[in-house]
Amino acid sequence: MPIQPGDAIPSVKVMQAGAEGPKEVDTAALLGHGTVVLFGVPGAFTPTCSARHLPGFVQQAAALKAKGVDTVACVAVNDAFVMAAWAKDQGVTDQVVMLADGAAAFTKALGLEMDLTARGMGVRSQRFALIAKGGKVTHLGVEQAGAFEVSSADAILAQL
């Protein structure tokens, strides 16, 4: 069962892509304070993720901050080097924290994994976005297969 409003952000070690290279971070420590928007994508450099999902959060970062969001983070089941390359390709600076969940441990702890092995992609994240306040989920939007409606930056702005 996926994480639900009222549940705490799980504590899992992931890698944070950054200018200095990858560093290990604990998700509960990073995402457990203030107001956080976390969105998950099936993969870096994939079509909807690159054309709409990540760019929407980059473009709306100032509007999210204006509504009280302290941290905007993106997670994908990719390695930190891929996440860093994707961030560079997309012009991401410090507006969005890029998290690499290479083994899908965090995604599985959220209950938001999907198996795309038949398509050659292995276990990936479902497309989702959540809002957490003080480490507790207050809103979760998980997309149906092929959809992009409830996890966009605009949809999250409407929930704040």
Image (tube, helix red, strand yellow):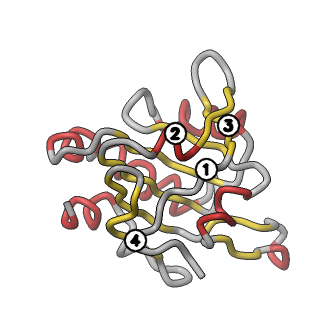
Lower sequence index among marks 4 and 3: 3
> What secondary structure is found at the residue carrying circle 4?
strand
Lower sequence index among marks 2 and 4: 2
Would you call the spot at circle 1 few (<14 residues within 10 Å), some (14-19), or many (20 or more)?
some
Query: Gap between marks 2 and 4, in whole Å?
Result: 20 Å
Lower sequence index among marks 1 and 2: 1
Residue drawn 23% across the image and 47% down it: 64
Query: Gap between marks 4 and 3, in whole Å?
Result: 23 Å
Foreground of the two, 51 or 26? 26
Residue drawn 84% across the image and 69% down it: 120
Q: What residue did someone put label 3 on?
A: 15
* Left or right, residue 22 beside residue 155: right
Residue drawn 60% across the image and 82% down it: 1
Q: Amino acid at mark 2?
A: Ala
Residue 29, numbered label: 2
Foreground of the two, 30 or 65? 30
Q: What residue did someone put label 4 on?
A: 140
Query: Gap between marks 3 and 2, in whole Å?
Result: 13 Å
Which is more foreground, mark 1 or mark 4? 1
Image coordinates for residue 123, horizontal then vertical, percent? 77, 67
Q: What residue did someone put label 1 on?
A: 11
Query: Gap between marks 1 and 2, in whole Å?
Result: 7 Å
